Amino acid sequence: MSESFLTLPAKMGAIRSVHFSPDGKYLAVAEPADYVHVYDASTGLYEDKQTLEFIGETAGVSFDPTGDSLFIGNADDLVGSIYEFIRVRGKESPQSWEDLVL
């Protein structure tokens, strides 16, 4: 392929990593810090997305094997951790991800 078929925007700059969910329905796009965008990839249009915001440098992003949890590694010196966001299904928000508080 010699040309792009789609360009996904970012808030801060270059994208650090991209990962598809195991079922191929979602694409997680991680920026260098503070933002991960989760796109609906099921249609191939990537029009619907949810932006997950946090504080710190992004170390990585990955879905669990079921695709129901999204893990974001934070490499910030002060607040470094692993965040887990769970997929919430329902009529109001069929493609929503919420922070899991333990």
Image: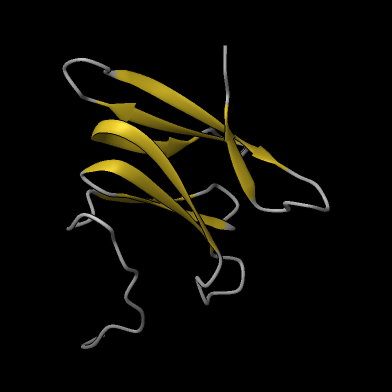
**Image coordinates for residue 68, horizontal then vertical, percent:** 63, 37
**Can you see residue 58?**
yes
User: Quadrant location of the C terminus?
Assistant: top right
Q: Which residue is located at x 57 percent, y 17 percent?
A: 101
**In the drawing, does residue 30 fall left or right of residue 27?**
left
Residue 76's quadrant in the figure? top left
> Is 84 above or below relative to 2?
above
**Image coordinates for residue 29, horizontal then vertical, percent:** 36, 53
- Which residue is at the front of the view, 83 or 34? 34
Q: Which residue is located at x 64 percent, y 39 percent?
A: 87
- Residue reaching furthest top? 102
- Which residue is at the front of the view, 64 or 35? 35
- Residue reaching furthest right? 91
Q: Which residue is located at x 34 percent, y 45 percent?
A: 35
> Is 38 above or below relative to 9?
above
- Which residue is at the front of the view, 58 or 1? 58
**Image coordinates for residue 74, horizontal then vertical, percent:** 28, 27
**In the drawing, does residue 33 fall left or right of residue 65?**
left
**Image coordinates for residue 25, horizontal then vertical, percent:** 59, 58
Residue 100's quadrant in the figure? top right
User: Quadrant location of the N terminus?
Assistant: bottom left
Q: How is the image coloured?
A: secondary structure
Q: Which residue is located at x 42 percent, y 37 percent?
A: 62
Looking at the rendered structure, the number of numbered marks drawn on it comes to: 0
**In the drawing, does residue 96 fall left or right of residue 57?**
right
